[in-house]
Image: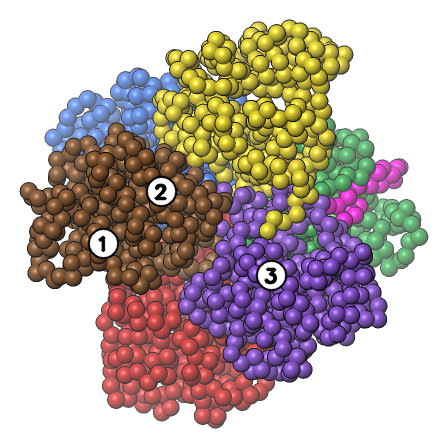
Chain colours: A yellow, B blue, C red, D green, E purple, F brown
Amino acid sequence: MTRFVCFGEILLRLTAPGRGLLLQSQQLDTHFGGAEANVAVSLARFGHAAAVVSTLPDNTIGHAARDAIRAQGVDTSGIRFTPGRMGIYFLTPGAGLRPSDVLYDRADSAFARAPGVRDWSAALNGADWLHVSGVTPAVSKAGADAALAAMKAARAAGVKVSYDANFRAKLWQARGDDPRPTLDALMAEADLAFAEARDFALISGKRFETSTDAIAAAFERYPNLSRIAHTVRTPHSSDANDLGAYMHTRSGHFRSQTIAITGIVDRIGGGDAFAAGVLHGLAQGFAEESVLEFALAAACLKHFMPGDFNLVSEEDVRFFIANPKADVRR
Amino acid sequence: MTRFVCFGEILLRLTAPGRGLLLQSQQLDTHFGGAEANVAVSLARFGHAAAVVSTLPDNTIGHAARDAIRAQGVDTSGIRFTPGRMGIYFLTPGAGLRPSDVLYDRADSAFARAPGVRDWSAALNGADWLHVSGVTPAVSKAGADAALAAMKAARAAGVKVSYDANFRAKLWQARGDDPRPTLDALMAEADLAFAEARDFALISGKRFETSTDAIAAAFERYPNLSRIAHTVRTPHSSDANDLGAYMHTRSGHFRSQTIAITGIVDRIGGGDAFAAGVLHGLAQGFAEESVLEFALAAACLKHFMPGDFNLVSEEDVRFFIANPKADVRR
Amino acid sequence: MTRFVCFGEILLRLTAPGRGLLLQSQQLDTHFGGAEANVAVSLARFGHAAAVVSTLPDNTIGHAARDAIRAQGVDTSGIRFTPGRMGIYFLTPGAGLRPSDVLYDRADSAFARAPGVRDWSAALNGADWLHVSGVTPAVSKAGADAALAAMKAARAAGVKVSYDANFRAKLWQARGDDPRPTLDALMAEADLAFAEARDFALISGKRFETSTDAIAAAFERYPNLSRIAHTVRTPHSSDANDLGAYMHTRSGHFRSQTIAITGIVDRIGGGDAFAAGVLHGLAQGFAEESVLEFALAAACLKHFMPGDFNLVSEEDVRFFIANPKADVRR
Amino acid sequence: MTRFVCFGEILLRLTAPGRGLLLQSQQLDTHFGGAEANVAVSLARFGHAAAVVSTLPDNTIGHAARDAIRAQGVDTSGIRFTPGRMGIYFLTPGAGLRPSDVLYDRADSAFARAPGVRDWSAALNGADWLHVSGVTPAVSKAGADAALAAMKAARAAGVKVSYDANFRAKLWQARGDDPRPTLDALMAEADLAFAEARDFALISGKRFETSTDAIAAAFERYPNLSRIAHTVRTPHSSDANDLGAYMHTRSGHFRSQTIAITGIVDRIGGGDAFAAGVLHGLAQGFAEESVLEFALAAACLKHFMPGDFNLVSEEDVRFFIANPKADVRR
Amino acid sequence: MTRFVCFGEILLRLTAPGRGLLLQSQQLDTHFGGAEANVAVSLARFGHAAAVVSTLPDNTIGHAARDAIRAQGVDTSGIRFTPGRMGIYFLTPGAGLRPSDVLYDRADSAFARAPGVRDWSAALNGADWLHVSGVTPAVSKAGADAALAAMKAARAAGVKVSYDANFRAKLWQARGDDPRPTLDALMAEADLAFAEARDFALISGKRFETSTDAIAAAFERYPNLSRIAHTVRTPHSSDANDLGAYMHTRSGHFRSQTIAITGIVDRIGGGDAFAAGVLHGLAQGFAEESVLEFALAAACLKHFMPGDFNLVSEEDVRFFIANPKADVRR
Amino acid sequence: MTRFVCFGEILLRLTAPGRGLLLQSQQLDTHFGGAEANVAVSLARFGHAAAVVSTLPDNTIGHAARDAIRAQGVDTSGIRFTPGRMGIYFLTPGAGLRPSDVLYDRADSAFARAPGVRDWSAALNGADWLHVSGVTPAVSKAGADAALAAMKAARAAGVKVSYDANFRAKLWQARGDDPRPTLDALMAEADLAFAEARDFALISGKRFETSTDAIAAAFERYPNLSRIAHTVRTPHSSDANDLGAYMHTRSGHFRSQTIAITGIVDRIGGGDAFAAGVLHGLAQGFAEESVLEFALAAACLKHFMPGDFNLVSEEDVRFFIANPKADVRR
C-alpha cells in the first residue's frame, strides 16, 4: 500500500441523460469528478492509501462532493470547506457522429479563490507521491501558486511528484495570462509527467520534428523528470475510439498495443484512469511493459461505466487483460 | 387582450426529485423561472400579449430558457443573449415538517452584468403595463439602474407600472449596499405595488402600529401609487399552508377568504401567480372583490403543479372557484 | 370458488406521472383498465374464476391489454381480436385542490364497433354471474345491443346478472341518442344493481323526494331486481375523500360507517372495487352487514395503489378491517 | 432570413423507452412531430422565419403540440384548434437486428377532418416558400384538396412550392382511393420535389430503365419543377445505416458522398431534416454541391438525438462537416 | 398446437439499469426468468399450450413471478407455493469491452428445497413434450431427483423429453457432488438434447478428438437420443457476438449460417430462445434446415429486448429471416 | 467529539418506488441500513467519531454497503468481508390507509453466520460508547454470543454500553429459541437502554400494572442501567403518526411534547434516529429535557427523507426545533 496525495478541484458534473441533448429532457444526472480526485479514487480502488487535498464550498453540494469521494475509500480529511460556489460543468454526452459537448461554469469557485493549504508539509506527511495536474494552474493565479508550492514542498520532503499536463486552453484564455512560464516551472518539479510532444512544444514554444525529439528535449530541460507517459486516442465516432499508450524513460521507450474501444459509455476520466494505472504499476514495481499494459487496460475499462470515476479493482483490470472479448462472467 | 412587458432575470432551477434531499439521488429536475417571467407566462396563459425583456447567456442553457418561455406563448424577442453564465438555484422541496431549502448560485450571471436594454421606449412600444420586481435591483447595481430606467421610461410613455416588492435580504447583503434609497425610488414609480406593511416599514425605516397605518403612509408618500395588493401565508408544514389576500386602493380595502392549501406540490411561484391574477383582473375590469378572488384562486392552483409557472387558463381558475373540492373532471 | 363473466371494454390509460400536468413532462405512465375488467381482476384476486369477454384490436396494444389482465389470473379466452384501434383515455391525476382530469379518446374503438360475441350461451357456459356496466351501452348502439343480449342470455341460462349503472353523460351525448329506454331495458334484466337514487331518477325521468322513494320505486318497476348497492363519496380535495356505502334489499336497508380516505394515490377503479367486494361477499354468503363492510374496505384500499386494478387479496381486506390505522406490517 | 410556411399534420408520438418493446415497460416517452412541422422546426433553428399551418384538437394535447413547436421558434399563429382527436402513432424503436415498428392511430383526427384554412392567400402572406408533403393527401380527401389548394394559392401568389413526395401506402390503402391523379396534380405545382425514381414510377404507372430516365421524364412532365432531391439509405441494422443524397436540376446532377451512420439514436425525421437542409441551402444561395453536402450532414445529425426534430443550428452542421469524427467539444 | 410442460426454477433477476455498474445508481430493474420458464414463454408466444411446473415462495415475490409468466399465456396451474425464499440473481449487464456479470443468490430457495411434484403422471397429462434443463439437478439433490423422476415419468407416459444440458459449474461446486452420474442418467432419458461436445466430454470424462466424435459417441451411449442441437457463440464484445447453430440427427448433420449480432441489448435467455425455436420447428414439422434457421433467428432476436423472455411471435421471426437488415416497419 | 462503536448487521433494502406495490412496477429502489449502522451514520452527521463493526459478503453488494456507510463519514475499517450472502429486505412503503409491508430475506447472511470479531478489546480501543441492538441476538445464536461478548468487553474496558431492545418476534420464532435468557443477559450489561415497559415485561415474563412499575423493576433488576429512553408512536395512517418520547433515570422521569407527524416520507430508521439523538445529547452534556427534545426532533425529521439514514446535522435539528412549521429556507 502506497500513500498518494492528490491536489486539485472537484467539480459537479451535470449530464444530459440517455442519449438526448442538454435540457432536451427535464432531468440531469449528477456526478462528481475532477482530474486529481479521479486519480485518487482509482488508486484507492487499487488498494492504496489515497487522499484528496482540495477546497469545496461549505454547503450541501460541497458536502455531497466530499461524501462521493470518501464513499470510494479516499481520505477526505484534507478538504477545506469555505464560503463560495461549487465549480460546475454541463456535459452533453455524444452519440454516434454527434460529439460530446462540455460547457464549463466553474469560474470563481471556492477552489479557484482559495485552492491551497497553509501547511503543505503537514498535508504531505507520510506520503509517497503527490499528484497534481495542469488544470489547477489554469483555474486561477492562486491555483498556479498553490500547485507550485505543493510540488516544491513535496520535493523538499522527498515525496515523488506526478504531474498530468492536461492543458486547458479555454481556462488559460479566460485567465488572460501566458501559461508558459507557469507550466515550465511546474514541469521542472515533476518526477513523472503525463504529457506528450504537443505539451512540450507548447511550453517551450518550439516545434519538434518528431515526437522523439520532443521527449528527448524534455528529458534534457527537466532534470528531475525520470518518466513520461501518455495515451494516443483516435476517435472514429462518439461510440468508437482507438486507444494506445506510450511510456518513456531515460533508458527506453515503450509502446502498447492499440485497443479498439467500441460501445463507449462515458470517456470522461479515461486519461485519469490511465494516470492511476501507471502510478499503481510503478508503486507495485511492475515491469515497464506491464505498467503500460495495465494502465491502458484500466483506461479502456473506464470508458464502459458512467461518471468520472474508474470503479474497477486490480482484479477487474487483470480479468480484462486475460479476457478481452467480454464474455459473460457467471 | 392587454399587452404586458415583464423585465427581470430568468433562472435555471435544479430540483431534488421525489421527496429526497439535494443530491441524495443522482438526478436533478430542471425548470426555468423567475419572478417576472412567471408573471408573463401566467398572463399569456390568460390570453394576453406578454413579453419578457431579459438577458440570457448565449449558450445551450440560455437558449433552452428562452424556449421554455416562448413555449408558453410569451414573446421572447426582447431577450438579449450575451457571453456569461446562467443564474442557477438549487431547490430541495420540503416534505411534511422538513422545510424547503433554496441554495442560490446566481452571482455574476449574464443578467446581473448586463440586465437592461439600451432603448426602453422601443422595448415598451405598444405596452399597456410594465411589470418589474424587487429582485432585479437586489441582483446588482446595474439591475437597480435598469429597473429604475425601465419604470421611468414606462411612466414617460403612459405605460402603467406594476411593481412586486419581493424583498431579498440575502442578495442585498451580498451586494453590500443600503437597499432603502433604491427601493424608495422604485416604489415611487409604481401604479400598482405588490407589497405589505413590512415592505413599507423596511423602505421607510419606520415602525407602523398597524398594517393599516403602513398602507396609509405608503399612499401618502407615493402619489403615483393607486393600488397595493398582497397575500398572507400561514405555513403549517411543507404540505399545508393557509393563504389569504388583501387589496388596498385609495378608496377602500378588500380582504379575501382564507384557503387551506393542503397537499402542496410546489409553492415556488405562488406570489407571481397572485400578481398575474391581479393584473388579469384589472385588465379585464373585474370588480375589486373579483380581482382578489381570482388572483387568490390562481395563486392556490399554482401550488399543485411542479415548476415555477402557473400553467392554468382563466377557465381553470373559474372552475376551481366554482368547484373548490377537486372532484374528478370527466 | 364462484364463476364470473365480465363483459365490457378494456381501455389503455395514459397517465401524467408524478404530480404534474398532462404532457408537462415527456413521459406517460400506462395502465390497462375498464369497469368490468377491473371487477374481474378483483374477483380473481379474491380467489374466484373470473373471465373477461371483450374485443381488442389485433395489435401490440391489444395483446398487451390481454396480457395485463391474464397476469392477474383472469380467463381471457373470451377476448376477440379484430382490426381497429384501442380505446384510450388520458388521465391527469389531481393533487390537493387541483382536480383529476380525464380526456377520452375512445371513439370508434375495436370494441365500440364489434363489442359482442355471437354465441352468448357458450360464453356464459358454467357461469354463476354475469357482470355488465352502463358504460357499454353508452359506447355505441352495438354496445347497447350486445349488453342487452348478454343479459337476456344470462337470465335464460339461469346465470345471475350484476349491473353497474355507471352513467356516462359525455358518451351518451356523443352518441346523440336518448339513453333512457336502453338503460331501462338493461336495468330490467338485473338481479343486482350498483345504482343510486339519481340513476333511477335519470332512467325514469322522475324526481324522487327522498333516496328511499327512489329505491322503493326501483324495486317496484324492476321485478328481477333483488339488491341495490352503492357508495357515497364526499370529496374534500384530490387527496381526501369520505366514503360510505349503502345496500338495499327488498327486506332491508344497510348503511356502512364512513371512512375518511386521506393520502389518495389513485381513485380510479374505486367503484369497481366496491362492486367486486359486494359480489365476493354475496358469493361467500356473508351477512348483509359484512358484505357492505368488506366491499367498502376493498374500495378504500383501491385508493392507495396506482392503476385501475384493486390488487388486494381477501386477507388484505380483512387485515385492513382489523387494523385500520396502517401500522407497519413486519 | 427567408419566410417558410409549412402545411401538414402534427402527431403525438408515443415511444417505448430505452431499448424495450412497446408496453414492455409501463412508461411511454412523448414527442410531437410531423413531416412538415419537422421541416419548420429545422428551418427556424437555421434562423429563418418558419410558420406552421395546421389543425389541432382544442384540448390539452393539441395545446401541448402547439407549445412544443413554438418552443422551437416556429410561428404557430396559423394553427386552428377544433373539436376532435389528436393523431397518434406508437413507435417501438429498433435495436440491433430488431427493426423499428410504427403503429398508426391517426384516423379521423382533427386535422384529417378539417385540414385546411379558408383563406390561403392570407396564410401565405409574405412567404417565400410553401412546404407540403405527400402525407397530407394520404390522410383524407379533405387533406388532398387542401394540399392542392395551398399549392395553387402559393403559385398564384409567387410563393415557391416545395413538395416532399413521402408516399404512404398504408394510409392510401385505408382511404381506398387511387393516389395517382392526386399525386400527379400535386407534383405539377411543385418547384422543388423531394422524390426519387420510384415515386415518379408510382405516379406515372411507368417503369423506368434507370433512375436517370425517371428524373428526365419528371422534368418533362412537370414544367414547373426545377429541382429534385432525395436521399439514398442502405440499412445494415437498426443502429447502422449508410446515407447518401442526390440533387437533380434541369442543368445537372449532383451526388454526395455516402456517410456511414452508426450508433443511431432515432432516425425518425431524417428525411425532413434533409428537406430543411436543402431549403436552407437554397435560401442562402449555396452552390449545388454545398446544398447537398449541408443537407446530408443535417440529415445525419438528426439520427443522433431523440424525437422528430433536428435540434441543430447551422453552426452545428458546419462543425460536423469539418469534424466528422465526433471528438469531444470542450 | 402442441402441449409442452417445462419443469425448472423461476428466478428474480435484479439488473443494474442503463449501462452502469451494480448499485452504482440507486435503482434496480426487475425481471423474472429461468431456463425452462423462458422456453415455456417462447413456446406460448409461438402459439403452443405451454405449462410451467415449479415451486415458488408463497409471498408477494413468488406471486409476482407467477403473474409475469401467466401474462405471457403460460399455464401456471402447476406451480406450487411453499414457505421459503425466492431464488435471486443480480445482473450487471456488460457494455463494450466490459463483460456482463452474474452474482447468484439462489441457495436454499423454495424450489431448491422442494422442487418436484408428487404426481408426475398428473402433471404431464396430455403433454406432448417435457422440457428439463441441467440447471435443476445442479440446484440441489432434490432437484436432481425431481428432474430424473419427471423425465422417467414422461418416458413412461409416451411424452417426448427435451433436455438442455446447461452445465453450471458454480452450482455443482457449491453442492459438492460429482455431477457426472446424475448428468449421465438424465441424458439417458432425453429424446432431444441441447448439448455440445464439451458437455459430452464432461459427462463421460473422455476427450474427443473432434466434435463429430463426441456427437457420435453420444448417439451410441444414449439410445433414446434422436437429436442434438446447439449454438456456437463467438463473443467480440458485450455488444457484438457471432452466433451460429448445429443440429445433429442419427442420419445427418446440419449447420446454419453465422449471424453477426451487433448492438446487443440483453443476451440472457438466448439459449432458451434457441431451444424453443427448435421445439417449435419440430412441433410444426419443419424440414431440418428450416428448424435450424428458425431457431437461430429466434435466438438472435432475443438479444434485442430486455429481460429473459423472447417476446416474439412466429411472424416476427419469419419477418426477420426475410428482412435481416432491420429497416423500419411502418 | 465522542467516539462510538456500533455493532450490528447492515441490510440491503429493496423498496417499491413511488407509491406502488412491490413489483407492481419493474423497478426497485435500493438503500442500505440497519439499526446500528443507522445510529452510526446519524452520530457521524452530528460530528462524532462513529465506527461500524460488522460482517458483509465479499462481493459487489457488500462493498457497496460499506461505501454507502463510509460516504456518511463513518469509520468502516471494522467491517469484515467473508464469503456468503447479503441480508435483504423488501419494503413496500405504505400510503394512506394501506400499511407499509416488510418482507425479510435475511436468513443465513454473511453476518448471521459470522457476526463478531475475534478481539473486541482492539475493536473498542479508544471508544467512549458501544451501541448494540436486540436485532443481533435475534439473527442467530452466533449473533447473541457476539453481542454479549461485545458488551462484556466494553464494560471491562470502561466503555459505556448503549442497548436498543428492538424486539423482533419473527426472527426469534425463526431461530426457535427462548429469547428471554439472552435478552436478560444483554440488558444486564447496558448503561443506557432504549426500551419500554413491554420489553421489560417480555424479558421478565411479568405483567406490570403501570409503565412506571416496569421501569422501576428494570432499574432494580439491572444495577448497571442508569437510563432508559423510548418513543411512543400513535399511527393514524401511513402518512400521519403522532410521536412523543420518554426518558427515565434513577432520579427522574421526563416526557416530551407530542409531535403530529404528517406527510411521512419514510419512517424506517425513526427509532434509530431517536437513539442517536439521545446519545448525542448525552455526549454533549445537554440537560435531560434538552436531550429528549433534541432526540425527538431528530426522530421526527427522519420521517421526511427516503432511506434508513437520518441525513441531518445538529444545525438542522436545532432549526426544526426553532421553526417547526417548515417555512421555506431561502
Residue type indicated by callout 3 = Asp
> Residue B173 placed where, x, y %?
30, 21
Task: State whether residue D275 appears in this view.
Answer: yes
Q: Are marks 2 and 1 on the same chain?
A: yes
Asked if the stretch drawn in magenta spans residue D245, the answer is yes
Q: Which mark is residue F183?
A: 1
Residue placed under numbered mark 2 in the picture: F117
Name the front one of labels 2 and 1.
Answer: 2
Helix, strand or loop at label 1? It is helix
Q: Chain of mark 1?
A: F
Q: Nearer the viewer, residue A46 or B55?
A: A46
Is mark 2 in CB contact (under 8 Å) with mark 1?
no
Is mark 1 in CB contact (under 8 Å) with mark 3?
no
Name the front one of labels 2 and 3.
Answer: 3
- What's the magenta region? D232-256
Nearer-N-terminus badge (2/1): 2
Q: Nearer the viewer, residue F217 or F12?
A: F217
Answer few, some or many: residues within 10 Å of disc 1's Cα (few below 14, many 20 plus, some between 14 and 19): many
D82 vs A32: above or below: below
Residue placed under numbered mark 3 in the picture: E178
Q: Chain of mark 3?
A: E
Residue type indicated by callout 2 = Val
